[in-house]
Image (spheres, coloured by chain):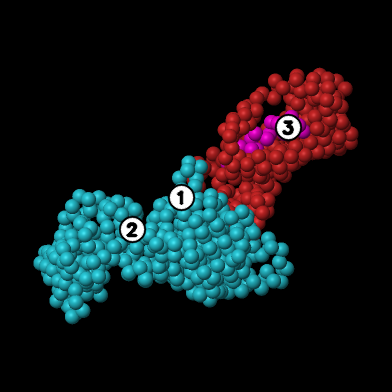
């Protein structure tokens, strides 16, 4: 029997919701104020005059649109590649016994723990020599490096949960190893694949340090980096409301993706494969 | 449909331990072959070598006229039911059954006909759109069988398919599997550790112990003419009684008394000193209700415990065994996955027997059914070779097997 929800529970929920959502609502409110209102001494929570002018402004800003395009392109490509590589690598790690398996996993973890900032200098130098500076691959490659370890760890945990018999049954049923992998193993590991995809996408979408250091123009600059250039005419009075509008715009895809994939991340998909 | 012929199959793992050692079994076309033995006897390994999930270290595996040692599982055209069913949880029952047909790239109409036919046979019609996770154990079992029968495979392989079911369902599914196999007439190899399944399902049964084939015979032959102590102890429930025995002419001295045995048996075991006598529980009877005109001997013994089941009665009579025999019996109990706490005689009496606990009763024993075993080798000295199938350990049998 489920414990009943008491008033204490609801009180707790409301507190946590306020704690989490207040900054989001604040940003939303700022984005709906005219620029002039944000620069006054004591801005209030609700706008005095409601306006969507800020959104019109940023969507008329070519630099912002190009940055948005870069963000989508780079994040999606990085996600796709990371998931593809991680799936294959994690499958090998989960299924094969080979020398140095632990070493591979440990190094992967070590890379994930490496501070991103410390690599900015060397990468900057390397990318200039290799002509990757200020290009999409120039960002995609380091993003892959930092997201692959986590993706591999997540996925290999999922693969390990899938009973060997699944593949063996598929092979006896007439599948090649590749067919067994594609038609049985990958669908079963779908929750893991989506988890890995979401983690990678968020990393690439939100990343700032590399994005600002390894780009110089809107040819490859992503939204988080581009937003730091929203200084307006007077650098002591940045257009806060436009910044807020941009922040809302970049948050929307994240929310949409989470809502979409949330349904896919269903735990216990493998229940029923074997004796339950 | 095809025959499966295994010749001198050996499976060695990385550490050199032979999990299957020089096993030769011929499964005829349409035959129901059982591989039985206690856990770790190599029966599952052998099955997985047939289907191609384990490499064969040496020996030949022939299916039909083809040597399949180096073929991938998908090229062997065999269907297998796994112990835990291995259904695809992301697919519906329909798609689970259709899976092998889709892999083979059959046309949609043919797939549909075959899946519906299989689901009808297995009474799965109302579950076709459900996922395996929502099915009961017995239904999952039937889906696994459905996936096997749509294939039109050369043979069915079952790896302990009933061990995850409860006792009642196990009985029903056992009958179901038997009926299905008879109807389809398909060559079947079935692995189990349960001797009841082995006896009831199999046309022939291969008994394995620690990777070595002990005896390959029909259930009746195994029961009546076990080739050695292990087979005798493993087949039959409750198991055969083993008693220390000494032979003097045709008088057999047992701890419970002395009985006379047929001359041919006495001759086969003469001059060996200490022996182990094997007598099945149902070879005994209460002398008061037995039809003693069939011959046999009687002895008197004190019954320690009586279990009356209505149609029959089990009586327990303790006895002392000399150390060499006791040791052999302990080892045997270990080999057959059972645990023997004390040396006692289990006898099966008629339900009408009036024997009570603590009584000294007169017991009749059918001496024609006594087997005598060599305590050192475990070999059955009184085996009727003509009716014992194939016993690889017996000399002369090897030559016969090779010429066959």
Chain red in the figure, letter: A
Task: Give the percent coordinates (x, y) of residue A180.
Answer: 65, 53
At 46% across and 50% down in the image, what residue appears?
B19
Instruction: Identify the main secondary structure in magenta.
Output: helix
Mark 1 and mark 2: span between their CA atoms? 18 Å
Q: Residues within 10 Å of mark 1 (few under 14, many from 20)?
A: many
User: Which callout, 2 or 3, points to the residue nearer the camera?
Assistant: 2
Mark 3 and mark 1: span between their CA atoms? 49 Å
Tell me the tag on residue A143: 3
Q: Quadrant of residue B163?
A: bottom left
Is A32 displayed left or right of B130 in the figure? right
- Marks 2 and 3: same chain? no
At 39% across and 62% down in the image, what residue appears?
B396
Q: Secondary structure at mark 2?
A: helix
Q: Where is mark 2, residue-wise?
A: B230
Can the viewer see residue B319 in this picture? Answer: yes
- Marks 1 and 2: same chain? yes
Image mark 2: chain? B
Chain cyan in the figure, letter: B
Asked whether A211 or B352 is in front, the reply is B352
At 74% across and 29% down in the image, what residue appears?
A142
Can the viewer see residue B243 in this picture? Answer: no
Is B151 displayed left or right of B253 in the figure? right
Location of residue B125 with respect to B322 vertically, above or below: below
Q: Where is mark 1, residue-wise?
A: B19
Tell me where the magenta segment starts and ends, as one range.
A140-158
């Amino acid at each position: 029997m489920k414990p009943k929800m008491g008033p204490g529970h609801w009180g707790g929920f409301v507190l946590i919701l306020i704690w989490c959502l207040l900054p989001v609502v604040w940003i939303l409110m700022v984005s709906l104020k005219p620029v002039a209102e944000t620069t006054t001494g004591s801005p209030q929570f609700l706008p005095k005059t409601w306006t969507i002018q800020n959104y019109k402004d940023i969507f008329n800003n070519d630099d912002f649109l190009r940055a948005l395009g870069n963000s989508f392109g780079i994040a999606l490509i990085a996600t796709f590649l990371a998931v593809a590589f991680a799936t294959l690598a994690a499958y090998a790690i989960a299924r094969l016994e080979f020398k140095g398996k632990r070493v591979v996993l440990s190094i992967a973890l070590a890379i994930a723990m490496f501070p991103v900032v410390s690599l900015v200098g060397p990468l900057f130098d390397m990318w200039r020599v290799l002509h990757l500076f200020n290009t999409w691959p120039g960002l995609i490659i380091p993003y892959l490096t930092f997201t692959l370890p986590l993706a591999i760890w997540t996925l290999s945990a999922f693969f390990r949960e899938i009973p060997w018999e699944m593949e063996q049954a598929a092979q006896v049923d007439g599948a090649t190893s590749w067919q067994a992998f594609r038609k049985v193993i990958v669908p079963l590991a779908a929750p893991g694949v989506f988890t890995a995809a979401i983690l990678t996408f968020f990393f690439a979408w939100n990343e700032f340090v590399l994005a600002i250091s390894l780009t110089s123009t809107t040819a490859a600059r992503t939204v988080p980096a581009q937003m730091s250039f929203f200084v307006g005419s007077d650098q002591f009075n940045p257009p806060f409301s436009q910044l807020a509008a941009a922040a809302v715009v970049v948050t929307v895809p994240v929310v949409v993706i989470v809502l979409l994939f949330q349904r896919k991340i269903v735990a216990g998909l493998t229940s029923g494969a074997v004796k339950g | 449909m095809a025959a499966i012929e295994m010749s001198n199959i050996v499976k060695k793992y990385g550490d050199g331990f032979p999990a299957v050692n020089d096993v030769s079994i011929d499964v005829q076309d349409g035959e129901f072959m059982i591989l039985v033995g206690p856990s770790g006897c190599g029966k599952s390994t052998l099955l997985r070598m047939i289907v191609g999930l384990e490499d064969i270290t040496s020996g030949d595996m022939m299916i039909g006229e083809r040597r399949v040692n180096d073929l991938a599982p998908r090229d062997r055209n065999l269907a297998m039911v796994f112990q835990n069913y291995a259904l695809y949880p992301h697919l519906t029952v329909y798609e689970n059954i259709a899976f092998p047909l889709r892999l083979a790239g059959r046309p949609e109409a043919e797939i549909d006909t075959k899946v519906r036919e299989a689901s009808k046979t297995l009474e799965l019609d109302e579950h076709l759109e459900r996922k395996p996770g929502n099915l009961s154990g017995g239904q999952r079992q039937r889906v696994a069988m459905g996936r096997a029968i749509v294939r039109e495979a050369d043979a069915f392989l079952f790896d302990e398919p009933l061990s995850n079911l409860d006792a009642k369902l196990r009985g029903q599914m056992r009958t179901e599997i038997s009926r299905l196999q008879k109807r389809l007439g398909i060559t079947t190899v079935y692995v189990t550790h349960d001797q009841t399944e082995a006896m009831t399902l199999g046309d022939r049964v291969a008994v394995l112990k620690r990777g070595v084939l002990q005896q390959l015979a029909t259930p009746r032959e195994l029961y009546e003419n076990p080739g050695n102590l292990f087979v005798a102890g493993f087949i039959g429930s409750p198991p055969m009684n083993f008693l220390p025995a000494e032979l003097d002419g045709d008088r057999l001295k047992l701890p419970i008394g002395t009985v006379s045995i047929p001359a041919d048996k006495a001759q086969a075991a003469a001059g060996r000193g200490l022996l182990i006598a094997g007598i099945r529980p149902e070879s005994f009877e209460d002398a008061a209700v037995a039809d003693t005109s069939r011959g046999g001997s009687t002895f008197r013994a004190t019954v320690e415990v009586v279990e009356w089941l209505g149609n029959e009665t089990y009586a327990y009579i303790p006895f002392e065994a000399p150390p060499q025999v006791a040791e052999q019996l302990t080892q045997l109990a270990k080999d057959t996955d059972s645990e023997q706490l004390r040396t006692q005689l289990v006898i099966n009496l008629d339900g009408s027997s009036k024997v009570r606990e603590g009584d000294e009763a007169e017991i009749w024993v059918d001496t024609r059914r006594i087997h005598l075993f060599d305590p050192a080798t475990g070999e059955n000295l009184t085996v009727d070779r003509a009716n014992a199938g194939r016993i690889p350990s017996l000399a002369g049998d090897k030559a016969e097997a090779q010429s066959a």
